[in-house]
Image (cartoon, rainbow, N blue to C red):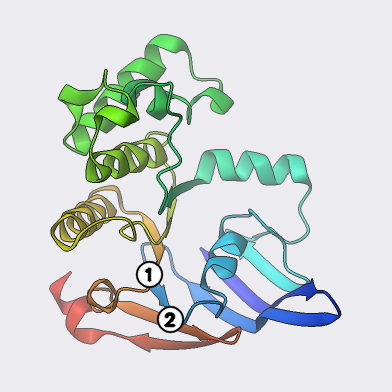
């Protein structure tokens, strides 16, 4: 699925050079569930952006099913993101003037899906996250946990191969955190997704079969056999 080799990302902060990623090598197999953890500024979100084609490395390659996201054309990159990758973010990123149904439908517009089919698939996606009855509500009429469920439905409605989540429980309390993680894990199994999540929460990280720790742009991988046996 993913093969990262020597991935480096450098930024300039005034006269200082910052190495957000420093030669990361990483393999993510199809169907993996990988959690990325580490201190603030360690490179977690930068790595997720590389996997999602939202940014390109300064050096190295990011192969997704054999296509190098580091060198492919912008048009091709946009197409790959639209078809293959679903994103979930900490801040939900819902459009406040659109209903839950309409927010989910937005993921299908770039794919050219016809209106009736968009509506059907969006309704099914909302049902799958337990929000079928709230389809007509605006984000402001939903709780934080419900808004994140809408965001998850939007990520999955296009039937991606990869789900990338950046601190998806960061704005939620502990009980709602557990509900969202349970939901994500259930959807990962049900849809056979490749699932990569960034989190600062050790309780969430302990549930993952594979754990990557990023510190100062360098990665360490660990297999969590107890979590893997529970899958």
Identify which residue is drawn at 30% across, 73% down. 201
Identify which residue is drawn at 39% across, 29% down. 104
- Badge 1, how many Cα within 10 Å: few under 14, some, many 20+? many
Identify which residue is drawn at 26% across, 56% down. 172
Q: Which residue is mark 1?
A: 199
99 relative to 70 in the view: left or right = left
Of the 4 image quadrants, the one containing the C terminus is bottom left
Place of residue 226 in the rendered image (x, y in percent of width and height, measured from the top left): 17, 84
Question: What whole-number distance in Å separates the C-alpha atoms at marks 1 and 2?
Answer: 11 Å
Q: Which residue is mark 2?
A: 212
Q: Residue furthest top?
A: 116
- Residue 130 vs 176, above or below: the answer is above
Place of residue 79 in the rendered image (x, y in percent of width and height, measured from the top left): 64, 39
Identify which residue is drawn at 46% across, 30% down. 95
- Residue 109 vs 51, above or below: the answer is above
36 relative to 186 in the view: left or right = right
- Residue 190 vs 58, above or below: the answer is above
Res. 123 visible in picture: yes
- For this rendering, which residue is in front, 39 or 124? 39
Mark found first going from the N terminus, 1 or 2: 1
- For this rendering, which residue is in front, 136 or 163? 136
Q: Quadrant of residue 158?
A: top left
* Residue 190 numbered tag: none
Res. 64 visible in picture: no
Place of residue 210 in the rendered image (x, y in percent of width and height, measured from the top left): 34, 78
Place of residue 133 in the rendered image (x, y in percent of width and height, measured from the top left): 15, 23
Label 2 residue SS:
strand
Label 1 residue SS:
loop
């Amino acid at each position: 699925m993913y093969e990262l080799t020597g991935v480096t990302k450098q930024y300039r902060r005034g006269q200082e050079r910052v190495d957000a990623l420093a030669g990361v090598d990483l393999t993510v197999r199809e169907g993996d569930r990988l959690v990325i953890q580490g201190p603030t500024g360690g490179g977690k979100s930068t790595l997720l952006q590389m996997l999602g084609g939202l940014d390109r490395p300064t050096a190295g390659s990011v192969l997704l099913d054999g296509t190098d996201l580091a060198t492919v054309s912008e048009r091709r990159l946009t197409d790959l993101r639209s078809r293959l990758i679903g994103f979930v973010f900490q801040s939900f990123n819902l459009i406040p003037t659109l209903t839950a149904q309409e927010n989910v439908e937005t993921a299908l517009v770039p794919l050219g899906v016809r209106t009736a089919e968009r509506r059907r698939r969006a309704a099914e996606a909302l049902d799958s996250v337990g929000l079928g009855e709230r389809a007509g509500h605006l984000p402001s009429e939903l709780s934080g946990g419900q808004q994140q469920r809408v965001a998850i439905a939007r990520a999955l409605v296009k039937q991606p191969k990869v789900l990338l989540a950046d601190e998806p429980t960061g704005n939620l309390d502990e009980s709602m955190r557990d509900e969202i993680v349970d939901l994500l894990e259930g959807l990962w199994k049900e849809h056979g997704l490749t699932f990569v999540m960034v989190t600062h929460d050790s309780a969430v990280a302990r549930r993952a079969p594979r754990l990557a720790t990023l510190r100062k742009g360098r990665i360490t991988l660990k297999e969590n056999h107890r979590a893997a046996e529970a899958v």
